[in-house]
Image: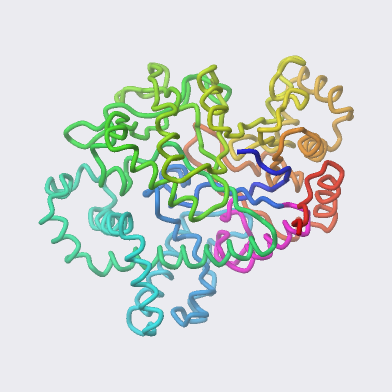
Amino acid sequence: MRFPRASGVLLHPTSLPGPHGSGDFGAEAYHFVDWLAGAGQTLWQILPLGGIGPGNSPYMSTSAFAGNPLLVDLHELHAQGWLDAADLEPVPGLSAEHVDFAHVVPFRMERLARAADRFAARGTAEQQAHFAAFCTAQASWLDDYALFMALCEANGWADWCDWAPALVRREPAALAAAAAQHAGRVAFWRFGQWCFFRQWAALRAHAHARGVRIVGDAPIFIAHQSAEVWANQHLFELGDDGRPTVVAGVPPDFFSATGQRWGNPLYRWSAHAADGYAWWVERVRRIFELVDVVRIDHFRGFAGYWEIPASEPTALNGRWVPGPGAALFEAVAQALGPLPIIAEDLGIITPDVEALRKAFAFPGMRILQFAFGGDASDKYLPHHHEPDTVVYTGTHDNDTVAGWWSAASEHERHFARGYLATDGHDMPWTMIRAACASVADTAVHPMQDVLGLPGSCRMNFPGKGEGYWEWRFQWSQVHAWHAQRLAELCRLYDRLPRPPRG
């Protein structure tokens, strides 16, 4: 699908300002949307909206369908009458500079639990009806998710394959007994999802009113400790004990000499094919209910993926295995029609990966930080870009441009200075200009690069399990010229929104 020429900013909602230790769907998110519109930006790219997993990563969520309850705006719950003013008072440990998950998680989840109790006790008939309608509409995934989370709590967050055997096997009588025993917490987890979806829908509507579309992110794999793996064990490569026999990752690459062992269970693609890829169709359908464009992470895994024996400690001793290929996307297209999907085609890209992407007209990705390590033939250089691509100065997995430049080799520096006609004094904005000037239909800039921030502000470092996903900005760092300069580059390079014809 050909995208309109446009520009956007990459920023996960947790990185927004706000008083409760991390960004959320509150007033600062609305202000950010307004700022984007004023800066001539028509895209807001985010990371996965699901709950966080090991290392606080949004790419290891406890559900492929549920939202992250940590993003719920507590002020809105107060406005509904479900929290008192005292509940909104910050506690020690909630930082404005970064997300201190050790303090943020208990603070926010405790407030959400208070709101759930008060809603149950004094929610109006209309509110209760809306909640019931939501639970009915989302029952295909919500029932499993809410019970799974309640059982995780009851079992001390042990892996689900270590629960009572009857629950591991999902025997109907055991599930019914557990749902009755933990009814209060099941209701809480449903309530958190209702708040998430309700607030996100309002924020997205505001973005649409301001001419801003949301670019979401769909990880190809999901966590083993997730409701969907527990509820659909036949769709994953698991042993009789429920544990993965093989896991996902990538071979040695730019980020790691031993590769990356992600540890996610791999799909049993034969089982998916047998039922027409129904689970994937539903997953794609649901994410497009939340966002306008979807970036599919690790797209190359659909052509062929790196299979690592679960017993291996690193990704070195894996092998390439064919993925589902076109059959999966044909099933999605038949069910849902053509969709605006971006294919994250980074890493080891073979001709079959490129052919799969082009067969469905999915734009690929070009990262400018990768462009200067070789010579003029490098595909990431702007003169090799194609319209059906999305150009980034860097992604959430890269260093900031300022951090990259400070650590760049002399070869990269010399090449970049000559190619970009710069002395290197303002590389973040030099790279943003190059991205805007590219023939790529879409240009996206991490907020860290808009603000010219150093490497200490990078969002993630692939392969490192701790200390990332924490960065936040403050409005005091944002000046009028940031929006003016973005808007001017969009004007110069034809990326401003076009008025509708009529």
Q: Nearer the viewer, residue 152 or 39?
A: 39
Residue at 79 percent of width and 50 percent of height: 496
**Residue 436 picture location, percent across and down:** 78, 39
Q: Is residue 286 left or right of residue 41?
A: left
**Residue 283 picture location, percent across and down:** 40, 46
Q: Is residue 487 above or below residue 324?
A: below
Within the magenta stretch, is there residue 187?
A: no
Q: Is residue 107 left or right of residue 413?
A: left
The residue segment tinted magenta is 12-41
**Residue 58 picture location, percent across and down:** 48, 46
Judged from this view, the residue extending furthest toward the front is: 502
**Residue 384 picture location, percent across and down:** 73, 23
How did the renderer colour the structure? rainbow
Within the magenta stretch, is there residue 21?
A: yes
Q: Is residue 492 above or below residue 418?
A: below
Residue at 48 percent of width and 75 percent of height: 77
Residue at 17 percent of width and 65 percent of height: 181
Q: Is residue 433 above or below residue 251?
A: below
Residue at 29 percent of width and 29 percent of height: 270
